[in-house]
Image: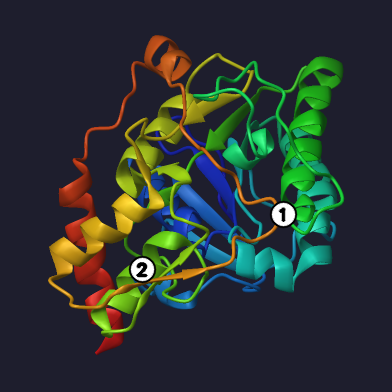
Amino acid sequence: MFTRSESHPISVVTGGAGFLGSHLTDRLLAEGHRVIGLDNFLTGNEANIEHLAKNENYKLIRQDVSNHISLPDDVDFVFHFASPASPIDYLEHPIPTLKVGALGTHNTLGLAKAKGATFLLASTSECYGDPLVHPQREDYWGNVNPIGPRGVYDEAKRFAEAMTMAYHRYHHLDTKIVRIFNTYGPRMRLRDGRVVPALIGQALKGEPLTIFGDGSQTRSFCYVSDLIDGIFKLALSDFHEPVNIGNPREMTIKQFAEEIQRITGTSSPIEYRPLPVDDPKVRQPDITRARAILHWEPRVDFEDGIRKAIEYFRGRLN
């Protein structure tokens, strides 16, 4: 059992074997935290945390956080990152996605309240839906279709934000909310349906690069170490309203595909397919709040980050 000490805070990370959860775990351990990872492995991957198997400051518990959570340990921070997070995952698992956003958030907030811990919710830029405001600021309420196929993820996160703020206002819990924009890097799954692994994987295999729609929709890609740095700073801040963390460097999907062609040297052509329902036309974070409150902004250059991601995915193909 981990017991509280001033020099070694104890953090719970739900979704601890996921892409972001595992990187967050590494950062927390590097900062002197002891970490309890919770994951039911619906979309998590044990390979993401296998390097921690003998780390005495880390333990993993196989747990669906949509069910009651009981831990004997002291806890200083609860980071709620559990959720399917790619379109393929939440379209395949719509009800677990809703449950982890609703019940999972309720349970993890309850854990933080019982332990007197700080709570940080991993929310998403999908709260803005297909936005009518560009770039997206935290005071924009969004344009979301609650009954569309993406609604199971979008509305789960919006509900999670509402519940987090309710616990802050009613129970005076120390809470934070990060709205995460498109993030990429090592430990993403090649076949999770997101644009970065999808196009890199196709390029490395010599397959056509699949673009949905005409490729004019935009995204803003943040390297994972930059994102985790912003999240860590937010956890230590005194700010309680949502904060965008992402890279404001915006590009079209077609431009991104052309960059992948150039950097990988593939001769694969671009292939166009119909645009999915409710696919956002634009996505770009306004990070004024993060700059002012956290003194944070992304530092990893796009080409440097993409080359690291390509090398990681190249290793997964061998």
Q: Quadrant of residue 48?
A: bottom left
- Give the amino acid at mark 2: Leu
Q: For numbered disc 1, what is the local secondary structure?
A: loop
Q: Is residue 202 above or below residue 292?
A: below
Residue 93 seen by the camera: yes
Using the image, tell me which numbered label, if any, was put on residue 71. Answer: 1
Q: As rendered, which of 109 and 193 lies closer to the eye? A: 193
Quadrant of the frame with the N terminus? bottom right
Q: State the image quarter where residue 158 is shown.
A: top right
Q: Is residue 292 above or below residue 294?
A: above
Mark 1, Cα crowd under 10 Å, few <14 / some 14-19 / many 20+, is: few
Quadrant of the frame with the C terminus = bottom left
Q: Is residue 70 something that shows in the picture?
A: no
Q: Position of residue 309 (x, y in %)?
A: 26, 62
**Residue 227 versus residue 11: which sits nearer the camera?**
227
The local secondary structure at tag 2 comes to helix
Using the image, determine if residue 91 lies above or below residue 226: below
Q: Residue at x 64, y 18 (%)?
A: 241
Q: Label 2 belongs to which residue?
A: 199
Question: Looking at this rendering, what residue extends furthest in the bottom direction?
Answer: 318
**Residue 175 place in picture, x, y as percent:** 66, 26
Q: Position of residue 151 (x, y in %)?
A: 78, 50
Residue 246, located in which quarter of the rendered image? top left
Disc 2 crowd, CA 10 A, few/some/many (<14, 14-19, 20+) = many
The first of marks 1 and 2 along the sequence is 1
**Marks 1, 2: nearer the viewer:** 2
The residue lying at 74 percent from left, 65 percent from top is: 64
Identified at 42% across, 48% down, the residue is 183
Residue type (three-letter) at the residue carrying disc 1: Leu
Q: Is residue 83 left or right of residue 152?
A: left
Where residue 187 appears, as percent x and y from the top left, is 38, 66
